[in-house]
Amino acid sequence: SLSECVNFGSNLVGWISHSKTLDIQDAVLVTNLRHFIEQIDACSELLKLSISEPCLVLLRAALESFINGSYILQSDHENRGNSFMYFQFLEQIKILDKLDSETDAGKQMAAIIRKDAFLHGLTLSPPKDSANIKSNIIAIMNSQSYATVHAEHTRLKSTNPKSKLQWYSLFGGPTSIEGLANITGNSGVYEIFYRYASGFVHGNKIVTKALDAEGISGIRMPFSAQFICSFSLSLSFILFKKYVEHYCKDKLSDYLNWHISMRNIYLSVSNEELIKFE
């Protein structure tokens, strides 16, 4: 069932990519969609091997792309999409600075590595053309395409220099992923699933999940398989429809036909106990 999500999603990416010249916000939206599909694809392949618990980590990542895409599609597409990309550039600059032993960030990074039990002795070095790479990135950030975002980012940093801004914080946006979930209408999913799955990301849910009456359970146990399929299908139905309606309304009938074809599978994994443990 999840492989069919991946197939339709991949077609959707192709339809969008070939329907127009992608602007910055389009590229951000399509890559978020691609990332979402890739996580669902990974879940599909893992479930074939009865590996279910690691899928929760992948679904958490898929949910973030789901929320990101929903937020950008919701309104103010250009500023939100450009903000996402602008923060990608900021992160690239941070990495280049940390790799450069001549910068303050590079010196701090070298000191951290010297104290690290695993990385001790590692010497970092920037790309040979890092100066040009950095100057090109800065030139793009200062270009007319990002003028509005650059001005907003500068304004917020000058107001509170120590604040840790997120891309969605610009233009009156929320300050956390929880706030982003709320503003996109996904507060319940955040509270119930995102927080739960975060326990597996951070490793603090592993004890209670791995223990049963006979001790520590084995690996490759499909305990969460049905939930993963059901939740993945639900997210896919909603997200794909949003993208079709925004980019290619002429494909709406294709989406509806696909959705109908998946309906019985969705109802089955959502309402019936297909996998029993004794």
Image: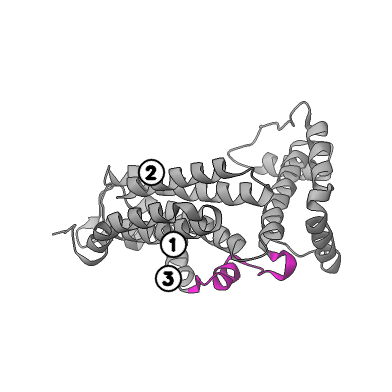
List the residue tagged with mark 1. Answer: 238
Crowd tier of the residue under label 3, counting other residues whose Cα lies within 10 Å: few below 14, some 14–19, many 20 or above: few
Crowd tier of the residue under label 1, counting other residues whose Cα lies within 10 Å: few below 14, some 14–19, many 20 or above: few
Q: Tell me, what colour scheme is on the image?
A: one colour
Q: Is residue 269 left or right of residue 249?
A: left
List the residue tagged with mark 2. Answer: 7
Residue 255, position in %: x, y? 40, 54
The amino acid marked with disc number 1 is Ile
Disc number for residue 192: 3
The amino acid marked with disc number 3 is Ile
Q: Does residue 175 lie above or below 216 as drawn?
A: below
C-alpha distance separating marks 1 and 2: 16 Å
C-alpha distance separating marks 2 and 3: 28 Å
The amino acid marked with disc number 2 is Asn
Q: What secondary structure is the stretch in magenta mostly built from?
A: helix
Q: Is residue 186 left or right of residue 149?
A: left
